[in-house]
Amino acid sequence: SNAAYYFIDNTDDIGGAFADCIGGLVSVVAQNVTLTIKPAGGAKLVGQPMTKFKYVVLGDNSYKFTIPDITEGESKNVLIKVKLPLLTAPVNGVEDAPVAMCTVEYADCLAGNLASADCMVAVSRPESLTEKEAEESQNPTVAVQKTRFQAGIELDRALNEADS
């Protein structure tokens, strides 16, 4: 399923197909990528992540994802559902509102070594939001990814139903 196929109509097309295939090989920037998402600040990861990547749920309620090779300029998305703890007071500064710690580990193909990076995810939780503030706080990238994932699930369901 990871193979590339080319229709070559005549010998003049061989060079372009070969260049395209080799170009894909040399543009890989990260391999053996794992992403670990660990809840923080009393938050809990709930439900199944919205992703096609393989993952395991670890004993501490963390998710560990295995992500295929990443090519130059490419990004990968993983959506998770988080249950936030009940607050006794509003939290306006994101540094005071950790939700999850993300750790990515990978083989850096450009530097030729193993690499890792950590990132704390935080969410400010003010006492109230106007409707406009709530609308502006929504991330369009998340909305697009969620829609894509849900559409993929529906397509898979429809194909399975058609096959039965």
Image: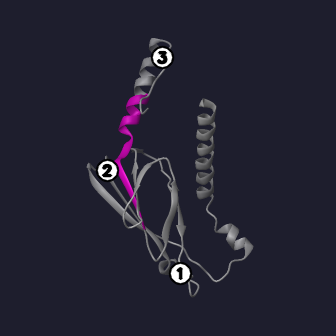
Vertical placement of 113 versus 4: above or below? Answer: below
Name the outermost residue toward the right: 131
- Residue furthest bottom as drawn: 89
Above or below for 148 versus 162: below
Question: Looking at the picture, which amino acid does disc 2 mark?
Answer: Asp
Which comes before the other along the chain, label 1 or label 2? 1
The residue lying at 54 percent from left, 70 percent from top is 83
Magenta range:
20-38
At numbered mark 3, what does the secondary structure look like: helix, strand or loop? loop
Assign a secondary structure to mark 2: strand
**What x and y, as percent, mark residue 34?**
36, 54
Badge 1 element: loop
Outermost residue toward the front in this view: 164
Q: Residue furthest top?
A: 10
The mark found on residue 93 in the picture is 1
Name the N-terminal-most of marks 3 and 1.
3
- Give residue 8's mark: 3
Residue 108, numbered label? 2
The numbered mark, 2 or 3, whose residue comes first in the sequence reads 3
- Identity of the amino acid at label 1? Gly
Residue 19 as seen in the image, left or right of residue 79: left
Residue 26 x/y as whole percent: 36, 37
